Amino acid sequence: MGNNLNSNSQELFESEYTRTPPWGTVTLLEDGKNYRIHKITLKPGHHISTQMHYHRSEHWIVVAGTAKVIFNGEERLLMPKQSTYVPMNTRHRVENPGVVPLVMIEVQNGEYLGDDDIIRFPDEDEVGGRIQN
């Protein structure tokens, strides 16, 4: 499974199912036909780059911490036990504005879940996945 996950020089793999980009960790919990489930931990003050997917939607459930989610420029905060749905073809980003790690479960659904369906957009306030104020 780990061989199918793309990495760059800044990411380390803790195990076959966990990768550690500079902003936190991503652990693959389950990989099925047309769905994939991750546990994502985001360090305080960090974010995942603005992105979009043509072939998958995502559902995020906050387990711990606070998530600031941005869809097509609109912001909202999610607390533990709250969730949101990210439709296909929607620019989205998640940030951890808090002082404790953000832990969320991400469920991806779609006919194609390959890493080449991640279209990234430049983030003006980003340096290594950290939010610059």
Image: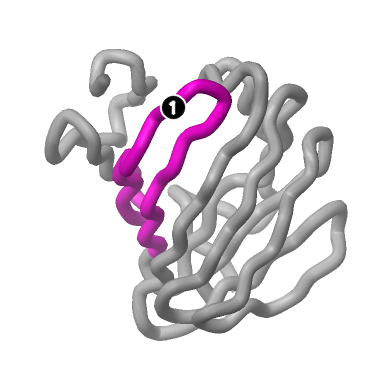
Q: Say few, some or many: other residues with alpha carbon within 10 Å of mark 1 (under 14 / 14 to 19 / 20 or more).
A: few
Looking at the rendering, which quadrant does residue 102 occupy? bottom left
Closest to the observer: 121 or 133?
Answer: 121
Q: How many marks?
A: 1
Closest to the observer: 27 or 109?
Answer: 109
| Residue carrying label 1 | 32
Please indicate whether residue 30 sits to the left or right of residue 52 in the image: left
Q: Secondary structure at mark 1?
A: strand
Query: Image point 58% across, 58% down: which residue?
Result: 60
Q: Position of residue 91 (x, y in %)?
A: 78, 44
Closest to the observer: 2 or 50?
Answer: 2
The quarter in which the N terminus is drawn is top left
Q: Main secondary structure of the magenta part?
A: strand
The quarter in which the C terminus is drawn is bottom right
Q: Is residue 35 magenta?
A: yes
What segment carries the magenta color?
21-42
Query: Which kind of residue does numbered mark 1 sit on?
Result: Gly
Please indicate whether residue 39 sits to the left or right of residue 92 in the image: left
Looking at the rendering, which quadrant does residue 76 occupy? bottom right
Please indicate whether residue 18 sits to the left or right of residue 103 in the image: left
Query: Image point 64% across, 45% down: which residue?
Result: 58
Q: Position of residue 20 (x, y in %)?
A: 27, 44
- Image height check: is 16 above or below 98? above
Q: Is residue 98 magenta?
A: no
